Image: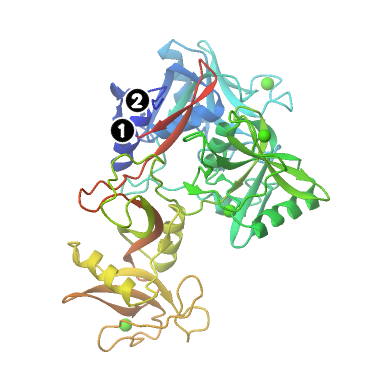
């Protein structure tokens, strides 16, 4: 049951660790062509066909992204490359107007389409939302807007990197706010999170999930009555549609409902009467009823629906439901327990960048709310081998007086170095931590100083059996559509 249809899931872990221009493939290397002028590399996916959404995921799985064409030089390079490859003639790019139904953007690069090379008469049909590149042998590689569901070849490109060769993360939340990129972006905020209504096209659950990821979001998890009511109210006020995918599904084991993007279990529910019904219906559809509310129904995941995305929520490692290794040797055996996961980033950035960069990876900048947490951080820091200062989220930016964590909660217990906080330069409003004998301590520092930082997130681990150390690994869950059989195939690795 668990297999990777296209043989690509297995590389996710290696690709994440080190990105280079030679990419590991399941059976060897991904052959890339390097544009010497820009140092970007390109992969012509000549041996696999995929729709626009799947193509985006497949590029991502090999550490690349669907191609963007910022200018004439890149266009010319791609034309020469495809023309001399002499194999296929039609390829997906990342160009689309799906985001708001009007404006063409390079979805991978989060940039508006400025330079264009449309075929005569294109773009034409308003129902064709994605840009394909068509080779006109020895003449050009011209563009056509086309039905995004069509399965065809595609071109991946290496992501943008900074001077140090580090991949530059796309800033979709910034793009939401930039009217030159997408003036009609249907995004709104509730309870500090952003939501996007995907009502330009109807997609399968998995393609909808891919689209949300494409714009730096994930299919929505509805985890309280307030959130469900807010979504209903927004849909009622905007008349945005009546039927949407959420991120809820029981694809993993056919029984238990999870918010698949995060791995969290579905606890709050708003099922319609007599739902969930058929065991073959594995994904949660949201039904908008104007005067009644937003109700849930399970549906086959291959049905085409509009969808709702949400900015990334914290991720949880969820064990497979069946635990065969637990022998009941301790009281917590088999019971999921919460723990905090820390992630140290050895990159020197300002306080604000640290806050943002943690959020970009679905985590939060470290807060140390109590003594127990300080001890845990001591241990984490003592076990590491560097001596740089590290940002916490503690600051007194709001009123220059009260020290608070990122959540706004005032700090009640302090673990300063002796002589700190000293507000040495009169602008020390952010809290960093450093090593000291037997642990760590705090210093107030200027927020624009450049320090390492620690991101944190809560995760749930199954405490199977402390003695045999058989705790669950964090599964990377990828679900691919078997394009030959048109059904979902789960991949757990
Ligand atoms: Ca067309
Ligand atoms: Ca949510
Ligand atoms: Ca149903
Ligand atoms: Ca200081």
Q: Are marks 2 and 1 in contact (CB under 8 Å)?
A: yes
Q: Quadrant of residue 244?
A: top right
| Residue drawn at point x = 51 percent, y = 19 percent | 483
- Residue 440 visible in rendering: yes
Location of the C terminus by quadrant is top left
Of mark 2 and mark 1, the one earlier in the sequence is: 1
| Residue drawn at point x = 47 percent, y = 80 percent | 410
* Mark 2, other Cα within 10 Å: few <14 / some 14–19 / many ≥20: some
Image height of 179 relative to 417, above or below: above
Label 2 SS: loop
- Image location of residue 370, percent across then percent down: 37, 76
Between 116 and 238, the residue placed more toward the observer is 238
Q: Quadrant of residue 242?
A: top right
Between 113 and 77, the residue placed more toward the observer is 113
- Image location of residue 226, percent across then percent down: 67, 60
Label 1 SS: loop
Instruction: Compute the Cα span from label 2 to label 1.
Output: 7 Å
For this view, does 353 lie left or right of residue 214?
A: left
For this view, does 480 lie left or right of residue 385?
A: right
Residue at which label 2 appears: 32
* Label of residue 21 in the image: 1
Between 303 and 142, the residue placed more toward the observer is 303
């Amino acid at each position: 049951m668990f297999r990777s249809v296209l043989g690509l899931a297995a590389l996710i872990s290696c690709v994440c660790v080190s990105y280079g221009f030679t990419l590991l493939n399941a059976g060897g290397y991904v052959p890339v062509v390097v544009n010497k002028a820009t140092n970007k590399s390109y992969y012509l996916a000549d041996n696999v066909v995929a729709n626009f959404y799947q193509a985006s995921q497949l590029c991502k799985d090999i550490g690349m992204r669907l191609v963007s064409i910022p200018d004439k030089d890149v266009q010319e390079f791609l034309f020469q490359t495809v023309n001399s490859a002499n194999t296929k003639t039609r390829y997906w790019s990342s160009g689309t107007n799906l985001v708001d139904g009007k404006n063409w953007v390079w979805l991978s690069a989060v940039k508006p389409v400025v330079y264009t090379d449309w075929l005569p008469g294109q773009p034409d049909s308003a129902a064709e939302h994605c840009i394909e590149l068509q080779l006109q042998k020895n003449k050009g590689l011209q563009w056509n807007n086309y039905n995004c569901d069509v399965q065809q070849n595609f071109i991946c490109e290496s992501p943008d990197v900074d001077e140090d060769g580090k991949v530059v993360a796309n800033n979709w939340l910034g793009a939401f706010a930039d009217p030159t990129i997408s003036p009609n972006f249907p995004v709104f905020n509730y309870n500090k999170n952003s939501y996007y209504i995907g009502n330009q096209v109807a997609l399968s659950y998995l393609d909808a999930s891919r689209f949300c990821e494409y714009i730096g979001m994930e299919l929505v998890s509805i985890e309280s009555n307030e959130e469900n009511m807010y979504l209903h109210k927004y849909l009622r006020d905007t008349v945005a549609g009546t039927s949407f995918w959420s991120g809820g599904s029981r694809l993993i084991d056919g029984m238990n409902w999870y918010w698949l993007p995060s791995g969290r279990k579905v606890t709050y529910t708003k099922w319609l009467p007599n739902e969930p019904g058929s065991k073959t219906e594995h994904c949660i559809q949201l039904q908008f009823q104007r005067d009644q509310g937003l109700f849930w129904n399970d549906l086959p995941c291959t049905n085409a629906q509009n969808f709702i995305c949400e900015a990334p929520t914290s991720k949880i490692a969820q064990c497979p439901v069946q635990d065969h290794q637990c022998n009941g040797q301790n009281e917590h055996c088999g019971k999921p327990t919460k723990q905090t996961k820390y992630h140290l980033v050895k990159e020197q950035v300002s306080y604000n960048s640290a806050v943002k960069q943690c959020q970009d990876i679905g985590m939060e900048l470290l807060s140390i709310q109590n003594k127990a947490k300080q001890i845990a951080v001591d241990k984490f820091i003592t076990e590491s081998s560097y001596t740089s200062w590290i940002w916490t989220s503690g600051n007194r930016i709001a009123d220059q007086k009260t020290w608070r964590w990122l959540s706004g909660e005032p700090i009640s217990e302090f673990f300063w170095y002796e002589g700190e906080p000293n507000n040495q330069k009169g602008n020390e409003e952010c809290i960093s931590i450093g090593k000291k004998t037997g642990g760590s301590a705090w210093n107030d520092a200027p927020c624009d100083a450049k320090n390492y930082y620690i991101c944190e997130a809560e995760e749930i681990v199954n405490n199977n059996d402390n003695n045999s150390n058989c705790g669950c690994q964090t599964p990377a869950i990828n679900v691919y559509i078997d394009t030959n059989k048109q059904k979902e195939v789960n991949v757990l690795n």
